[in-house]
Image (spheres, rainbow, N blue to C red):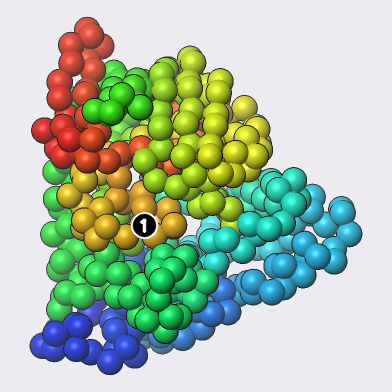
Amino acid sequence: MSSAAAAVPTTDFASLPFEEKLDRFAKVAVHVGLNLQPGQELLISATLEMVPLVRRITEHAYKAGALLVSTVYSDDETVLARYQYAQDASFDHAAQWMADGTAAAFKSGAARLALAGANPALLAGQDPAKVSRSNIAASKANKPAMELITRHAINWSILANATPAWAKLVFPGLPEDQAMTKLWDAIFTASRATSNDPVATWKAHSQHLHERVAYLNEKRFHSLRFHSADGQTDLTVGLADDHLWAGGGGTGGNGIFCNANIPTEECFTTPHKDRVDGVVQASKPLSHQGTLIENIRCRFEAGRIVEATASAGEDVLNRLISTDDGARRLGEVALVPHSSPIAQSGILFWNTLFDENAASHIALGQAYATCLRGGEHMDETTLAGKGANSSLIHVDWMIGSGQMNVDGLASDGSSQPLMRAGEWA
Ligand code: ZN
Ligand code: ZN
C-alpha cells in the first residue's frame, strides 16, 4: 500500500465541496479497499444511482494502472418489474453465464469491488417465497465466484454509496436532500475517508486490529460465552478446531493486501458448527434482501437453531434459516467494542456493512475458510471436519451492546473475561 493518495490535502474535509469528498472516497476505494495493482482488471457491481462514484473510482483505477474496469449495474425498477410480470419459472433461474464469467475473471486475476447501499426495503412488499427462490438461484449460480471471495483468493472490497431510499430509512424525519447529506457524511466518517491521509490512517487502524487478533490467536479459546446484563442472551459459541482470528486488512491468495470491508472494526473467527448452545437476542434489526427483521430471538442446541422468532419479518427469517442445513448454524463470530466509532455515532444504518461494525455479532451460514489454520487449501469435507459450516447464505446479525459481557473459555473449563459492558476487558 504505497502508491496511494499521494497528494495530502491541507483542507479540512468538512469544508470540501461534495465532488471533492466523493473523489477522496474513490481514492480510498482504489488504494485502501482494493489496493489495485497495475495491470489488474477490476470488476465493479453497483446500482444506477451510484454512477457518480463509479465514474470517480474508474478514473482512479485507470490512474493506478488498471488494465480494464468493467461495471455491472442493477436497477431497482427493473428488479421490481420481474416480481410484477415475470413467469413463475423466472424465480428459480439465474444468469449462470454471467456468474461463470465473474468466476473466470477472478481466476484470471481481476479484483472485485461491490458498492453497497441499494434500497434496503426494495423487496419488502414482494412475495417472500419468490424472493427466497430467486436468492437461492442466484447464490447457487454465484457459488464458484463467492468461494474465491470467502477463500480470499483475490483482492476485493465493499464500500457504501448513499442512495435516497436508504437515506430516508436512516433519517426518516428529514427531507431527502438533508438525509442524503447526513448519510454521506456518516459514510465518509465511518470509512475514515475524512483524514488528510486515509492510507496512513487505515494502516494504523489495521495495525491496531492486528494486535487484538494476535492476542486472541495466542489464547486459543475453546469457546466464547456471551451473556448480557439483562439476561436476554446467554449463548456459548464453540470455536472451530484450528480456528484463526482475523481483523483489519489481509493479504489475499494473489499476494495483494486489501481491506475487504470499509468500514471494519471487527475481530472475527470461525465457530464450531456443532457446538453452539443457548439463547440469543439480536441487539439491532437485520435488513435482509429487502426486508427488515426485528427483535430476532433464537435458541441453539448442538449448533442448530431449534427455535427462531422475530417481532417483524419472522416469515422471512424462517425461510432464510431453511435455505439449507447450514443456514441454521453459525459461520462467523465477531467481537466489536461498543466504543467503535460507528456504535458511538448512534446511527442505525439498516445495513450490515455498518451495523456489524457497531456491535459484536454472529453470522448464520457459510464460514470463512481463511479463519482456519491452512483452511484456504482444504476441501469442503476437511473444513467440515474442523467444524467449519457450509451454506449458500452468510448473514450477519448483531448481538452486542453496552450490556454485553463476553468470556473466553479454555478447554479445561477455565474462564477469562474478554469484554465487560461491551468493552474489551
Ligand atoms: Zn463480521
Ligand atoms: Zn460476516
153 or 139, which lies in front? 139
Judged left or right of residue 196, residue 359 is right
Quadrant holding the N terminus: bottom left
Judged left or right of residue 187, residue 300 is right
User: Residue 288: x percent and y percent?
Assistant: 55, 51
Kindly identify the residue that appears in the image at 47 percent across and 71 percent down. Answer: 168
Which quadrant holds residue 194? bottom left
- Residue at the limit of the structure toward the front, as seen here: 173
User: Residue 285: x percent and y percent?
Assistant: 45, 47
Kindly identify the residue that appears in the image at 22 percent across and 80 percent down. Answer: 5
Q: Is residue 379 above or below residue 67?
A: above
Kindly identify the residue that appears in the image at 85 percent across and 66 percent down. Answer: 85
User: Residue 7: x percent and y percent?
Assistant: 17, 86
Say which residue label 1 marks. Answer: 348
Residue 247 visible in the picture: yes
Judged left or right of residue 9, residue 396 is right
Identify the element where label 1 is drawn.
loop
Q: Is residue 126 above or below residue 58?
A: above
Quadrant holding the C terminus: top left
Judged left or right of residue 401, residue 366 is right
Residue 37 visible in the picture: no
Ligand 1 sits in which quadrant? top left
Q: Is residue 132 above or below residue 101?
A: above
Mark 1 nearby-residue class (10 Å; few <14, some 14–19, many ≥20): some
Residue type at the position of mark 1 = Leu
Kindly identify the residue that appears in the image at 69 percent across and 74 percent down. Answer: 77
404 or 244, which lies in front? 404
User: Residue 310: x percent and y percent?
Assistant: 53, 37
